[in-house]
Structure formats: C-alpha cells, structure tokens
Image (cartoon, rainbow, N blue to C red):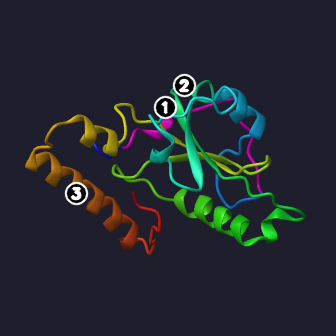
C-alpha cells in the first residue's frame, strides 16, 4: 500500500456538478441529493467499523460523481437555522474549504468539492484504495522499520508544506 499520495486532479473532471460563487473557491459545489445518490444514501462507509470514523463525521465511498470513485466526508448533523454562514460551524467549514482548495501536495488528500445545502455539510476528497493507514498497520503483523520511517516522513512533509504556507491543520490523523 502507499501511505499518503496524491493523484492528478485532472482525472476528477465531471460535467454533472455546478459551480457556486458563495465560497471563494473554484471547487464544485455538489447538491446534497447528488451525494446522497452517489453514496447509495450514505450506506457505503469505507471503514470496517464505526470507531474508525472520527466523532464528528463519517466517510463514504461515492461513485458516479467523477470518472474515479471519491470519498464523501459527511459531517455530523448541524441543525442550523437562519443564515447558516452566520454560525461558527459554518464559518469554520467555509474557511476549511477555501483554504484546503488552494493547496496541492503529494502527501495531502485533494479536496475535490463540497456541499452545504443539505442537512449535513460534506467534503468530497480523492479516494485512495488500499485501506487506511490504521487498517494496514493492524493487518500487518509487524510494520517494517523502513516502512514506518517512510510513512512518518511522508506525513511530516505534508505538514511542513502546510506550515510553509501558513496553514496549521488541526485534524491530523
């Protein structure tokens, strides 16, 4: 398996998404219904068990949005009312989408799109097959020292790239 890697964004071209000027990004905005259909009503979790998802969201495999399968990270229901961009959660979501859409590094998953029009906010990321780092560590009896070093080095390079661009990522797994 490969730890963290990056695919060319050109393979993720789609004609069934619409652009929105609400956020300061060129990323496509997906209607929540599109993501619901592409994930078979959010039924295809990519993790073996719920504890592998973090507390505030669940990650699903989506097919048909792009040429390649992608990941939809569905954030826990926010139950927002009124002008949703006035809330702290909405501002944080907006900031994350706008910031992460600007950066491209081989050790950082590519953010491909987002949705904020449904009951949950969603982020659409590239999909890397082969399982999560956690799944691969558990599967192997003993991860070789060189493999551990390469994984740690790759993670450090991704973090360094963000820090060199004045971004501090608060959700590193």
The answer to whether residue 63 is left or right of residue 90 is left
Callout 1 crowding tier (Cα within 10 Å): few <14, some 14–19, many ≥20 = few
In the image, taking residue 81 as reference, residue 23 lies left or right, namely: left
N-terminal of the two: label 1 or label 2?
1
Residue 83, given in percent of the width and then of the height, sits at 87, 65
* Distance in Å between CA atoms under marks 1 and 3: 28 Å
**Residue topped by disc 1:** 11
Position of 43 with respect to 163 (left or right) is right
Q: Residues within 10 Å of mark 2 (few under 14, many from 20)?
A: few
Q: Does the magenta portion include 14?
A: yes
Number of disc labels? 3
Residue that extends furthest to the bottom in the rendered view of this protein = 166
Eyeballing the image, is 29 above or below 98?
above
Q: Which residue is depicted at the point 56% across and 64% down? A: 99
Tell me residue 62's x, y (percent).
58, 30
Q: Position of residue 9 (x, y in %)?
A: 48, 40
Nearest to the eye among marks 1 and 3: give it: 3
The residue wearing badge 2 is: 67
Taken as a whole, is the magenta stretch helix, strand or loop? loop
Mark 2 to mark 3: distance in Å?
31 Å
Of the image marks 2 and 3, the number of the one nearer the N terminus: 2
Secondary structure of the residue carrying tag 2 is: loop
Q: Secondary structure at mark 1?
A: helix
Quick check: can you spot residue 15? yes
Q: Residues within 10 Å of mark 3 (few under 14, many from 20)?
A: few
Q: Which region is colored magenta?
A: 6-21
| C-beta proximity under 8 Å, tags 1 and 2 | yes
Q: Which residue is mark 3?
A: 152
């Amino acid at each position: 398996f490969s730890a963290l890697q990056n695919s060319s964004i050109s393979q993720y071209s789609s004609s069934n998404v619409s652009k929105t000027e609400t956020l300061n990004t060129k990323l496509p905005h997906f209607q929540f219904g599109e993501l619901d259909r592409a994930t078979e009503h959010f039924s295809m979790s990519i993790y073996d068990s719920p504890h592998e998802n973090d507390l505030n969201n669940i990650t699903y495999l989506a097919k048909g949005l792009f040429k390649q399968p992608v990941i939809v990270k569905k954030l826990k229901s926010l139950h927002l009312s009124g002008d949703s961009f006035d809330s702290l959660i909405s501002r944080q979501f907006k900031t994350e989408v706008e910031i992460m859409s600007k950066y491209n590094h081989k050790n950082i998953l590519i953010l491909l799109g987002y949705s904020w029009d449904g009951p949950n906010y969603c982020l659409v990321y590239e999909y890397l097959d082969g399982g999560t780092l956690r799944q691969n560590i558990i599967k192997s009896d003993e991860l070789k020292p060189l493999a551990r070093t390469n994984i740690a080095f790759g993670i450090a390079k991704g973090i360094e790239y963000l820090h060199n661009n004045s971004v501090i990522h608060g959700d590193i797994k």
